[in-house]
Image (cartoon, rainbow, N blue to C red):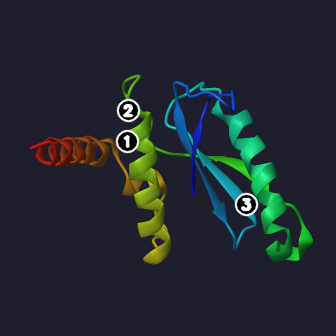
Amino acid sequence: MFPVNDCRAQTVPGGTHWSLLAYNASENLFEHYDSYPGSCNLPVAESLAKILAMFLRNSLKGGQPPIIQEMSCTQQLNTYDCGMHVICNAEGLCKKYISKDKRPLTEIVPSRVIARSRESLKDIIYSLRK
C-alpha cells in the first residue's frame, strides 16, 4: 500500500490531497482508493503504479503488467480528512484481506469509523505532547 499525494514537484514538499494505491497480487491489479470526488490523484497514482510495476515484473501474474482500477470507498464530507481516509482505508484493507472479508470497503470503513479514528488519533497526539 502506498499513500499518493497530488504534488507533482519531486524536489519540494507540497500537495493538497492524499489517496491510497494498493497492489492486489492475486488479481495483478493496482487499486486506487480516493475519498474526494473529482480529485486529480488518478494520474499521479497511475505514474506510481508504472514505476512499481517495474519492480514487480518478475512476480507478475502471467507476465502481464498490472492494470489500475478506481475502487469505491467512503467519500469524505469535508476538504481536510483525506489523510484520515488513507489511514483508515489502509487499515480496513488489511483487515479485509487478513480475515478474507468479502464486504466492500465502504462497509468496513464507513464515515463513523473515520470520525472515531480521527478522535482517537487526536487523543494520542495530545497525550504525547505532555
**x and y percent of residue 109 in the render?**
37, 52
Q: Is residue 1 above or below residue 9?
A: below
> Which label belongs to residue 96?
none
Amino acid at dot 2: Asp
Q: Marks 2 and 1, Cα distance to the nearest angstrom?
A: 5 Å
Residue, disc 2 = 81
Question: Counting residues from the N terminus, which is met first, the one under dot 3 or under dot 2?
Answer: 3
- In the displayed structure, does residue 32 sit left or right of residue 18? right
Residue at image position (50%, 72%) is 97
- In the displayed structure, does residue 70 sit left or right of residue 86? right
SS under mark 2: loop
Name, please, the residue furthest toward the right: 63
Picture quadrant of residue 125? top left
Residue, disc 3 = 29
- In the displayed structure, does residue 30 sit left or right of residue 19? right
SS under mark 1: helix
- In the displayed structure, does residue 44 sit left or right of residue 107? right
**x and y percent of residue 113 in the render?**
28, 49
Query: Label 1 near label 2: C-beta < 8 Å?
Result: yes
Picture quadrant of residue 25? bottom right
Residue at image position (56%, 26%) is 15
Picture quadrant of residue 129? top left
Query: Label 3 near label 1: C-beta < 8 Å?
Result: no
Q: Which quadrant does the N terminus fall into? A: bottom right
**Nearer-the-camera pick, 124 or 49:** 124
Amino acid at dot 3: Leu
> Which label belongs to residue 84?
1
SS under mark 3: strand
- Label 3 Cα crowd, 10 Å radius (few <14 / some 14-19 / many 20+): some
Q: Is residue 107 above or below residue 38?
A: below
